[in-house]
Image (tube, grey):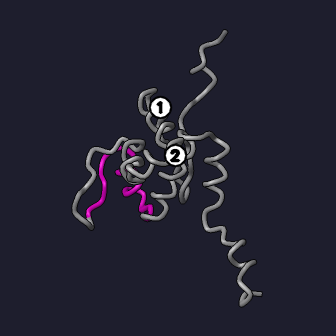
Amino acid sequence: MRDLRDFFSPHLTAPINGHVFTIECPNAETGLWLRSILQNPELANQESEIEIMHKLFKGTYLPKKPGKLPKGGVWDELWEHDVTWVEAVHLGMTAIHYFGFNEQAAIAYWESAGDNSEAVAEDPKVG
C-alpha cells in the first residue's frame, strides 16, 4: 500500500475573500478530546467554543480581558487578511464540525452561513 500522506490530507482548507486558510488536523489526543466533548452534552457545556477554536487554530494567546483579540497560529493569519470576527468564528465552528464529526457536517455548516431561508419562509410579513 502507498503511504497515506502521499494521497490524503487530513487538514481543513477553506477560502475567505480569496485567501485559503488551512486548519491543521489536530493530533490524536486533541482529536479524541474534541470527539469526547461533542458526544457528551455535559462535557460540552463545560467548554467554551472560543477555547476549542483557539486550540484548533494553534493560538498562543487567548485574552481574558474584553476587547483583545486572540493571537498566534491561524488567528494571526485571519487578522492579517482583514477577516471579520463573525467570519473567523464561522471558520472555527466549521473546524469543530470537521474534526469533531466529519467532512460532510463541516461542509453543511460552512455552506449554511447566512442562509435564513427557513426564517424568511416562516415569517408571514415577508413575501
Along the horizontal axis of the image, is 101 left or right of 52?
A: right
| Residue 60: % across, % down | 28, 44
| Residue 101: % across, % down | 59, 41
Name the image quarter holding the N terminus: top right
| Residue 74: % across, % down | 40, 47
Along the horizontal axis of the image, is 125 left or right of 57?
A: right
| Local SS, label 2 | helix
Residue furthest to the bottom? 125
Q: Is residue 47 magenta?
A: no
Residue pictured at 65% horizontal, 60% vertical: 112
Badge nearest the viewer, 1 or 2: 1
Name the image quarter holding the C terminus: bottom right
* Along the viewing direction, whichever of 62 and 77 lies nearer the viewer: 62
Q: Is residue 71 magenta?
A: yes
Q: Amino acid at mark 2?
A: Ala
| Residue 5: % across, % down | 57, 21
**Mark number displayed over residue 45:** none
Which quadrant of the structure image shows residue 119? bottom right
Label 1: how many residues lie within 10 Å, few (<14), some (14-19) or many (20+)?
some
- Label 1 to label 2, Cα distance in Å? 14 Å
Along the horizontal axis of the image, is 83 left or right of 100?
A: left
Q: Amino acid at mark 1?
A: Leu
Do callouts 1 and 2 mark residues in contact (Cβ within 8 Å)?
no
Above/below status of 56 relative to 16: above
Which quadrant of the structure image shows residue 58? top left
Above/below status of 120 relative to 108: below
In the image, which residues are magenta?
Answer: 68-84
Residue pictured at 47% horizontal, 31% vertical: 32
Residue at label 2? 95
- Lower position in the chain sequence, tag 1 or tag 2: 1
Residue furthest to the left? 65
**Mark number displayed over residue 32:** 1
